[in-house]
Image: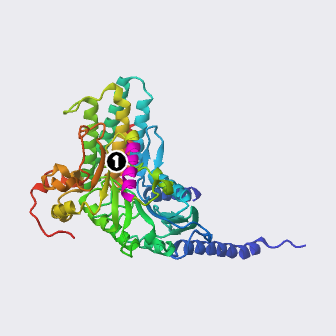
C-alpha cells in the first residue's frame, strides 16, 4: 500500500511538473549553447565543423521523428518545418552549399555564437505546443 | 498511578491534529485566493525635505515566457531578472526621480493548487524604495488595468514639470491575435492595441510620455509606432530582431548628468547609439536600433496606413495562412512603402547579421513590414477599409 502511495505521489509530481515546468524552449536553447561550448574548447577546425554538423543532424533527426510521430497538430508540423529551414540554412552556410560561402576556419567560434543567438531568437518565436516540445526534448536526449 | 489508556489519548488527540491541519489548509487557501490581500506589502514615508522629482520612469518587464539566453561564454541569464536588477539600480541612483517597476511574473502555485500573485510592483522616489507589493495581473485581456491603478495611486503631483520615460521589455508584441503571449495563460491575449490602451490609462491627462523605449523584437513597424505614438513624443525601438540582452540602460543611471536639461531628442540618440555599440560588440545576429520622432513620421505613416492595415486584415482574416508562413522584412523592400518620406523623422543604427543571407545588407529603413513567405501578398492586395 505504501509503495503504491509513493508511486502515485511521484507520478502526480511528474504529471503536474510538466505544465508547471514547461520550459521546453529553454532546453532547446541549452542544446545549442552546449554545442557552442564544445566547439570553443576544441582547437581543430575540422573537429569544430564535425561537432556543429552532428549537432544540426541530431536536432534535425529529432524534429523528423516528431513530425512523423502522428502525435502533433498541423500547425506544429509547419512550425517545425520553419525551424528546420532555419537549421538547414546554418548547415548550408557551414558547408558552403546552396549559394553560401563556406564559413572560414578562423570564424567558426563567431559562427557558433551566431548559431546560439539566432536559434535563441528562432526558438523564442516558434509557437509549438508543450507536447511537441516535450517530444523534441525527449528525442534529443535519446539521440545524444 | 494508573497509566492512561492509549486508545483514549489517541481518540482525543487525532481530532485536534485534523482540526489544526484543516485550519492551516484554510488559511493557505484564503491567503492564496483572496484578490485584495497582499502577500508582501512594504511602504516607507518620504522625508519632507527630499529633492524635487524631475524624472518619472515607468518600467514594465514581461517575464511570463521563455526569456533564457546565453552569453558567448555559455553563461545563462533570464532577461527579465537581469532587467529588473538594472531597473532597481537605476531607481536607486537617481535622487531626483520617481520610478515605477512592474515585473510581470509567470503564474505559479503553492502546493500545486493555490495560485500565487503573478505581478510585483516597486515604487522608488528620491532613490529610496517607497512601496513594494505583489499583485494580480489582469485576468483575461491584458490592458494593464492593475498597473495603471498603482501608477495613479503613487505618482508625484508635478507630472507636467517632469521628463517622463516609459520602458517596456518583452518579446515581440503581436499586432493581431496575441494569444499565448503569457506562457502561463495561453488563452490570455496581449497585443499592441492592449499596450496602447494601457498607455492611455497611464496618461489620463492626455500628456504624452517624452520618451517611450520599446525593448522588444520587431517594434519598429508602421502600425506599432502609429499606435504607441499617440502616447509618446519620441520612440526608441528595434525594427528587426532584438537580442534578449535588450537595450543598454546605463545612460539612465544618472539622469541628472545624462539628461540635465530635458533634451529628450538628443538623449534618445545617445541612448540608441550606446545600445547599438554594446549590442554590436556582443551579438552576431542583426542589430537595429531606431529613434522615431513621432510628429515627423506622421506623413509616412499616413501614406502607408492603408497598405499596412490591409496586410494585417488579410492575415487576421485568412485562416489558411499559417503563422509559420508569415515573416518580416524591411519595408524598403516593398515598393508600396518606398516613398520619399520613408526616412523622414527616423534615425537608424543598423548592422546586419555577421552570417546568413542578409550579411551584406547595407542599411535598414527603420521600418519593418510583414510578408507572406509563400507568396508576396503585399503586391496583390486591393485597398480595403482600414483598421483604425
Please tell me which residue lies in front, B186 or B2.
Answer: B186
- Check the image and report above or below for B217 versus A97: below
The image shows residue A54 at horizontal and vertical percentages of 34, 32
Chain under disc 1: A
| Residue B305 seen in the current view | yes
- Image point 73% across, 76% down: which residue? B12
The image shows residue B109 at horizontal and vertical percentages of 50, 64
Classify residue B261 as left or right of residue B24.
Answer: left
Q: Residue furthest right?
A: B1
Task: Classify 10 Å Cα crowding around label 1: few (below 14), some (14-19), many (20 and above).
Answer: many
Disc 1 target residue: A121
| Residue B176 seen in the current view | no
Callout 1: SS: helix
The image shows residue B365 at horizontal and vertical percentages of 23, 50
Region in magenta: B264-279
The image shows residue B180 at horizontal and vertical percentages of 34, 61
Q: Quadrant of the N terminus of chain B?
A: bottom right
As for residue B354 lying within the magenta part, the answer is: no
- Image point 37% across, 33% down: which residue? A110
Q: Quadrant of the C terminus of chain B?
A: bottom left
**How many discs appear?**
1
Q: Residue furthest front?
A: B261
- How is colour applied across the structure in the image? rainbow
Classify residue B214 as left or right of residue B125.
Answer: left
Main SS, magenta residues? helix
- Check the image and report above or below for A95 versus A135: above
- Check the image and report above or below for B290 versus A51: below
Rendering quarter of residue B192? bottom left
Classify residue A116 as left or right of residue B383.
Answer: right
Amino acid at each position: 500500500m505504501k509503495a503504491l502511495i509513493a508511486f502515485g505521489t511521484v507520478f502526480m509530481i511528474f504529471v503536474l511538473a510538466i505544465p508547471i515546468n514547461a520550459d521546453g524552449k529553454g532546453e532547446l536553447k541549452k542544446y545549442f549553447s552546449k554545442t557552442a561550448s564544445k566547439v570553443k574548447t576544441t582547437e581543430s577546425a575540422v573537429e569544430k565543423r564535425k561537432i556543429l554538423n552532428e549537432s544540426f543532424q541530431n536536432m534535425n533527426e529529432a524534429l523528423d521523428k516528431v513530425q512523423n510521430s502522428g502525435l502533433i497538430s498541423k500547425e506544429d508540423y509547419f512550425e517545425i518545418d520553419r525551424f528546420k529551414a532555419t537549421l538547414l540554412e546554418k548547415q548550408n552556410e557551414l558547408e558552403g552549399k546552396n549559394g553560401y560561402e563556406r564559413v572560414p576556419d578562423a570564424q567558426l567560434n563567431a559562427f557558433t555564437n551566431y548559431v546560439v543567438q539566432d536559434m535563441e531568437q528562432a526558438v523564442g518565436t516558434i509557437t509549438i505546443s508543450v507536447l511537441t516540445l516535450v517530444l523534441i526534448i525527449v528525442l534529443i536526449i535519446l539521440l545524444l | 498511578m494508573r497509566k492512561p489508556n492509549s486508545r483514549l489519548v489517541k481518540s482525543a488527540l487525532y481530532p485536534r491534529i485534523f482540526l489544526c491541519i484543516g485550519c492551516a489548509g484554510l488559511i493557505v487557501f484564503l491567503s492564496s485566493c483572496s484578490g485584495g490581500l497582499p502577500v508582501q506589502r512594504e511602504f516607507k514615508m518620504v522625508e519632507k525635505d527630499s529633492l524635487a522629482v524631475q524624472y518619472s520612469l515607468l518600467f514594465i518587464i514581461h517575464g511570463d515566457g521563455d526569456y533564457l539566453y546565453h552569453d558567448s561564454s555559455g553563461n545563462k541569464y533570464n532577461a527579465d531578472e537581469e532587467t529588473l536588477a538594472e531597473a532597481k539600480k537605476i531607481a536607486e541612483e537617481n535622487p531626483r526621480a520617481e520610478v515605477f517597476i512592474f515585473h510581470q511574473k509567470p503564474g505559479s502555485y503553492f502546493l500545486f493548487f493555490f495560485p500565487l500573485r503573478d505581478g510585483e510592483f516597486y515604487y522608488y522616489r528620491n532613490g529610496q524604495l517607497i512601496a513594494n507589493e505583489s499583485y494580480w495581473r489582469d485576468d483575461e485581456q491584458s490592458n494593464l488595468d492593475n498597473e495603471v491603478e498603482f501608477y495613479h495611486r503613487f505618482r508625484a503631483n508635478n507630472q507636467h514639470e517632469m521628463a517622463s520615460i516609459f520602458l517596456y521589455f518583452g518579446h515581440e508584441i503581436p499586432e493581431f491575435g496575441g494569444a499565448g503571449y503569457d506562457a502561463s495563460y495561453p488563452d490570455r491575449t496581449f497585443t499592441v492595441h492592449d499596450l496602447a490602451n494601457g498607455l492611455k490609462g497611464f496618461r489620463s491627462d492626455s500628456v504624452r510620455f517624452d520618451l517611450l523605449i520599446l525593448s522588444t523584437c520587431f517594434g519598429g513597424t508602421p502600425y506599432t509606432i502609429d499606435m504607441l505614438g499617440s502616447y509618446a513624443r519620441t520612440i526608441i525601438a528595434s525594427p528587426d530582431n532584438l537580442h534578449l540582452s535588450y537595450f543598454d540602460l546605463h545612460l539612465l543611471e544618472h539622469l541628472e548628468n545624462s539628461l540635465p536639461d530635458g533634451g529628450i531628442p538628443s538623449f534618445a540618440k545617445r541612448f540608441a547609439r550606446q545600445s547599438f555599440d554594446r549590442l554590436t560588440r556582443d551579438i552576431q545576429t542583426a542589430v537595429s536600433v531606431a529613434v522615431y520622432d513621432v510628429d515627423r513620421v506622421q506623413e509616412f505613416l499616413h501614406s502607408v496606413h492603408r497598405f499596412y492595415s490591409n496586410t494585417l486584415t488579410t492575415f487576421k482574416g485568412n485562416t489558411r495562412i499559417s503563422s509559420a508562413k508569415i515573416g518580416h522584412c524591411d519595408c524598403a523592400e516593398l515598393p508600396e512603402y518606398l516613398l520619399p518620406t520613408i526616412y523622414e523623422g527616423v534615425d537608424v543604427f543598423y548592422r546586419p547579421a555577421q552570417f546568413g543571407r542578409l550579411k551584406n545588407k547595407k542599411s535598414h529603413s527603420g521600418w519593418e513590414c510583414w510578408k507572406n513567405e509563400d507568396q508576396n501578398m503585399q503586391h496583390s492586395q486591393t485597398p480595403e477599409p482600414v483598421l483604425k
